[in-house]
Image: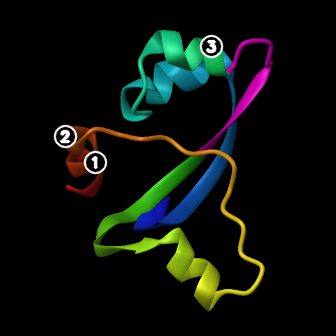
Amino acid sequence: MALVGECVVDDITEWQIADLWKALGSKTGVDRDTFDKYFEGAEHAVALHLVNVRRLANAVSLKDIRDRVEGFEPPQSFRYVSRAKSEALTA
């Protein structure tokens, strides 16, 4: 329930599911089983290519964001990642 990092979306691409895993599976942050379950029944996937990924020095709480931005509602999709994966993303 906090903003902990930021990034820039550098590119957005559409893939066949199998092709996305072959090309980017090791960079997705999930294992193959989780990937397959997420895309079950889908014919295509969209990949957001992120650059300038960085962890914020201090997390900004959801309450603080709502206090600063009238009507703010967070997205309904998120993923917790381990410290090691987080560090790999920001390295």
Q: What element carries label 2?
A: helix
Labelled disc at residue 84: 2
Q: Identify which residue is drawn at 72% across, 67% down.
A: 73
Q: In this view, does 90 lie above or below 43?
A: below
- 6 horizontally vs 63: left or right: left
Q: Identify which residue is drawn at 50% across, 59% down.
A: 1
Q: Quadrant of residue 84?
A: top left
Q: Identify which residue is drawn at 66% across, 62% down.
A: 74
- 66 horizontally vs 24: left or right: right
Disc 3 to disc 1, how far (Cα)?
A: 23 Å
Q: Name the residue under label 3.
A: 37
Image quarter in which the C terminus is found: bottom left
Q: Identify which residue is drawn at 64% across, 45% down.
A: 77
Three-letter amino acid code at the position of disc 1: Ser
Q: How far from the left and from the top, in percent, is residue 58?
A: 29, 75
Task: Tell me whether the residue at label 1 lies in contact with that at label 2, contact meaning CB atoms closer than 8 angstroms.
Answer: yes
Q: Name the residue under label 1.
A: 86
Q: Which colour scheme is used?
A: rainbow
The stretch of residues the image draws in magenta is 39-47
Q: Please tell me whether residue 43 belongs to the stretch shown in magenta.
A: yes
Q: In this view, does 18 lie above or below 30?
A: above
Q: Which of 14 and 88 is in front in this view?
A: 88
Q: Is mark 1 on a helix, strand or loop?
A: helix
